[in-house]
Image: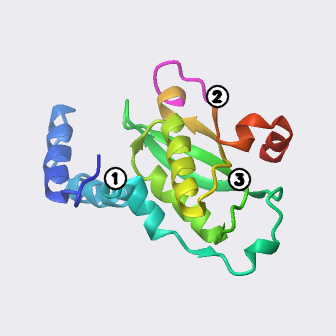
Amino acid sequence: MEIDMIDTKAIEEHIRGILIALGDDPEREGLKDTPKRVAKMYEEVFEGMKYTNHEIAQMFDKVFEEGMEEINTSKVVVMKDIDLFSYCEHHMALMYDMKATVAYIPNGKVVGLSKIARVCDMVGRRLQLQERIGQDIADIMMEITESEDVAVVLEGYHSCVSARGIKKNHTKTMTVELRGRFQQEAALQMYLR
């Protein structure tokens, strides 16, 4: 769901209510500015919620087409170890130490490398599921590059697993989104390791 703006005043009010519900005093010295700080943080870490995948693709669609006819379509562009974070939509818990690998086969266009990292960052800045992050990045990369051949691998830790419930600190979750030739040709998957 796309939103026009993040309502920081409403967030402040709700955080104040949560502090009260937890049995604390939102007027005590250490908490006085907490609702405002949390609202400001949420505005930053959930910025991606303001945009659709299409709008993100438009933001970061800097592609290079000139001279691309010389690029063999068997070439693979791979960017590894892209740092990102997100928040799980089930517990609003942090997904952290996440690394993305994004690969595509050019179809007459290559995208600026910094744009790939920016796409990952913006997609992570939503209430998300790790599986959806990979799908969204792949959808956006397909739109920008006009290539059907895209792969996204994500690895990361979930604080909803490490800090609560089962409390397994070293459990890493990996998701793989394969499109086009990456799905059909096992040899291309070696680039994702």
User: Left or right: 17 with respect to 56?
Assistant: left
Of pointers 2 and 3, the one earlier in the residue sequence: 3
Of labels 2 and 3, the one closer to you: 3
Which image quarter: residue 128?
top left
Mark 2–mark 1 CB contact (< 8 Å):
no
**What's the residue at 68%, 49% (across, down)?**
149
Q: Is residue 27 visible?
A: no
Q: Position of residue 104 (x, y in %)?
A: 70, 54
Q: Position of residue 122 (x, y in %)?
A: 46, 58
Question: 100 and 163: which one is in front?
Answer: 100
Q: Residues within 10 Å of mark 3 (few under 14, many from 20)?
A: many
Residue with the mark numbered 1: 49
Report the disc number at residue 39: none
In terms of secondary structure, what is the magenta stretch mainly?
Answer: loop
**What's the residue at 52%, 18% (across, down)?**
166
Residue with the mark numbered 2: 171
Amino acid residing under circle 2:
Thr
Q: Check disc 2 and report its element: helix, strand or loop.
A: loop
Chain part drawn in magenta: 162-170
Residue with the mark numbered 3: 103
User: Left or right: 192 with respect to 3?
Assistant: right
Residue 66 lies, with reference to residue 44, above or below; the image says below
Amino acid residing under circle 1:
Met
Quarter of the figure with the C terminus = top right
Q: CA distance from mark 2 to mark 1?
A: 27 Å
Residue 157 lies, with reference to residue 59, above or below; the image says above
Q: Residues within 10 Å of mark 2 (few under 14, many from 20)?
A: few
Q: CA distance from mark 2 to mark 3?
A: 25 Å
